[in-house]
Amino acid sequence: TAQENVETALVPLGTKTAERRERAAQALASVGLGERGKHLPSELSGGQQQRVAIARALVKTPKVLLADEPTGNLDETTRDEIMDLLEGLWAEQKFTFVMV
């Protein structure tokens, strides 16, 4: 599920299950997918899948986020939504954001 996908980023850090669930839910909510946590990847649009990937990257509260063409396979509307989302998260969380 989208929730499990985001949670997996915290497993190598030794984060306890309850905290993983809470942080993953918060990360999904921050990218506008709070209600989609139980959905499988096949049940999500391309833009929603991109946002799950962004949530997975941000759940560890990185100081630097590297993004390789995060909108390369998206339509124009979804691309703009993802870019607005990334810009908003950058302003809110104050991390270095490098996109190629």
Image (spheres, rainbow, N blue to C red):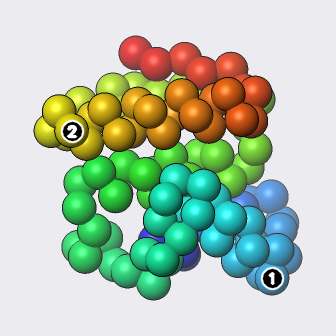
Note whether 76 is above or below 1 in the view shown.
above
Q: Is residue 74 left or right of residue 52?
A: left
Residue ID at (34%, 58%) = 48
- Residue 41 in view: yes
Residue 78's disc number = none
Query: Quick one: SS at disc 1?
Result: helix
Note whether 76 is above or below 97 in the view shown.
below
Residue ID at (68%, 20%) = 96
Which residue is disc 2 drawn over? 77
Tell me which numbered mark, 2 or 1, is placed earlier along the sequence: 1
- Position of the N terminus by quadrant: bottom left
Say if mark 2 contacts mark 1, CB within 8 Å. Answer: no
* Residue 26 image-quadrant placement: bottom right
Pick the front one: 86 or 16? 86
Pick the front one: 9 or 32? 32
Judge the density around disc 1: few (<14), some (14-19), many (≥20) Cα neighbours within 10 Å.
few
Going by the numbered disc 2, the residue's amino acid type is: Thr
Which residue is disc 1 drawn over? 18
Q: Distance between the residues labelled 2 and 1?
A: 36 Å
Judge the density around disc 2: few (<14), some (14-19), many (≥20) Cα neighbours within 10 Å.
few
Q: In this view, does 49 lie to the left or right of 95?
A: left
Instruction: Residue 23: give x, y in percent of width and height.
Output: 74, 66
* Residue 100 image-quadrant placement: top left
